[in-house]
């Protein structure tokens, strides 16, 4: 496995969660794309984990996966990204505000 993938993915997911929160959270279209991405990763995830594939395929898969994980962070309970739980949670009385909670999922 690409030894830098877990750290790069976690950092990118946190960055994208912040961007989604700035635009009001994920949309229905974002959730649909996330579902499609996870289905596609079942077929082509080896390129993301181990490299290879066509030119640009790794970058495309990385970006799609980071976006899909970011969307899933808005679901109650969040999502585990390479062993770290990332969850966009409401904070305080302002239900529009979210915080990224990173902690071990074990």
Image: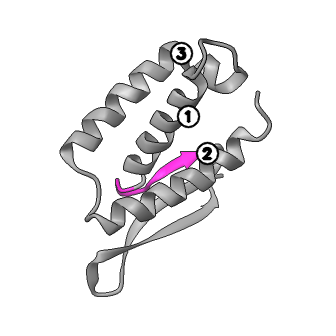
- 43 sits to left or right of 39: right
- Choose the circle earlier in sequence order: 3 or 2: 2
- 74 sits to left or right of 45: left
**Please, what is the dominant secondary structure of the magenta stretch?**
loop
Residue that mark 1 sits on: 62
Which of the labelled discs sits on residue 9, or is there none? 2
Residue drawn 57% across and 23% down?
A: 56
Instruction: Judge whether 43 appears above or below 37 on screen.
Output: above
Q: Secondary structure at mark 2?
A: helix
- 98 sits to left or right of 26: right
Is 80 included in the stretch rendered in magenta? yes
For residue 8, say whether it is visible. Answer: yes
Q: Range of the magenta residues?
A: 74-81
For residue 86, say whether it is visible. Answer: no
Residue drawn 66% across and 52% down?
A: 106
Q: Residue furthest right?
A: 3
User: Do the residues under discs 3 and 1 have CB atoms within 8 angstroms?
Assistant: no
Quadrant of the rendering where the N terminus is positioned: top right
- Choose the circle earlier in sequence order: 1 or 2: 2
User: Do the residues under discs 1 and 2 have CB atoms within 8 angstroms?
Assistant: yes
Residue 84: image location, x then y, percent: 63, 53
Which of the labelled discs sits on residue 44, or is there none? 3
């Amino acid at each position: 496995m690409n030894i830098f993938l877990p750290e790069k993915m976690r950092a990118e997911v946190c960055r994208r969660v912040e961007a989604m929160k700035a635009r009001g959270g994920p949309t229905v279209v974002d959730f649909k794309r996330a579902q499609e991405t996870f289905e596609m990763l079942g077929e082509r995830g080896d390129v993301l984990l181990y490299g290879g594939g066509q030119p640009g395929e790794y970058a495309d898969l990385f970006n799609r996966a980071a976006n899909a994980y970011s969307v899933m962070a808005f679901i109650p309970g969040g999502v585990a990204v390479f062993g770290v739980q990332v969850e966009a949670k409401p904070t305080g009385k302002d239900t529009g505000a979210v915080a990224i909670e990173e902690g071990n999922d074990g």
